Amino acid sequence: MNILDYLWQFDSAILLWIQSLRQEWMNPFWKGVTFLGDAGWFWIVLALLLLCFRGTRKAGMAAFLALAVGALITNMILKPMFVRTRPYEVIDGLILLVEKQRDYSFPSGHSCASFAAATALWGRLSHRTGIILWVLAGLIAFSRLYVGVHYPSDVLGGIAIGVFAGCLAHRFKPLSSPA
């Protein structure tokens, strides 16, 4: 057995374990959390709101840059390169809690977008806000496992790409316009 087989078995075991922890009363919460990451809409709206105010405009631009870099790497390069099947299609007994996804599994776009924006905004907004955004990003990432649409390695890959994109965007210094 090679390393990829071990990874698949480990990923599958974790997903089935998470499924065993599901409670009917928690399902709407986790479905709602995963909805916040759909197409990155929450993070896009947040970035747009930040662009509206002079004091947070650079933070909004950094969030948009991070989202764009993360989406490019995740959706345009890695998903077509790896073509990984979704776990609910191959793991016997895994129950899907949301609709079937239309793209490939690796890496998680929800996790990437969430950590890209949260990382780009870290230090550009208050410390408390930064913590809240990172917690929300973590909840969105975990929700993808809970609802059964990603393997843990997909989520970890998405987080890594998101943090990379967010760090890149955080370092970006937009040119200021002449006075």
Image (spheres, rainbow, N blue to C red):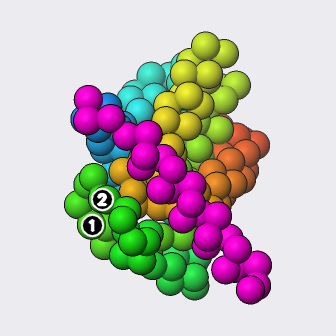
Which mark is on residue 96?
2
Q: Nearer the viewer, mark 2 or mark 1?
A: 2
Q: Position of residue 32 (x, y in %)?
A: 29, 37
Q: Position of residue 22 (x, y in %)?
A: 37, 40
Taking 78 as reference, is 169 left or right? right
**Quick check: can you spot residue 108?**
no
Main secondary structure type of the part rendered in magenta = helix
Q: Answer few, some or many: residues within 10 Å of disc 1's Cα (few below 14, many 20 plus, some between 14 and 19).
A: few
Q: Residue at x 31, y 73 (%)?
A: 102
Q: What is the magenta range?
A: 1-25
- The residue wearing badge 1 is 100
Q: Name the residue rendered at 39%, 71% in the picture.
A: 92
Q: Which residue lies at the image location 57% right of the left edge and 55% below the top edge?
A: 14
Tell me: 103 left or right of 139. left
Crowd around label 2: few <14 · some 14–19 · many ≥20 (10 Å) = some
Residue type at mark 1: give it: Lys
Q: As displayed, is residue 55 above or below residue 148?
A: above
Q: Is residue 3 magenta?
A: yes
119 or 61, nearer to the observer: 119
In the rendered structure, does residue 87 fall within the stretch colored magenta?
no
Name the quadrant containing residue 46.
top left
Seen from the viewer's position, the closer of residues 141 and 26 is 26
Quadrant for the N terminus, please. Answer: bottom right
Regarding residue 39, the answer to whether it shows in the image is: yes
Answer yes or no: do the residues labelled 2 and 1 have beta carbons within 8 Å? yes
Spot occupied by residue 128 in the image (x, y as percentages of width and height): 61, 13
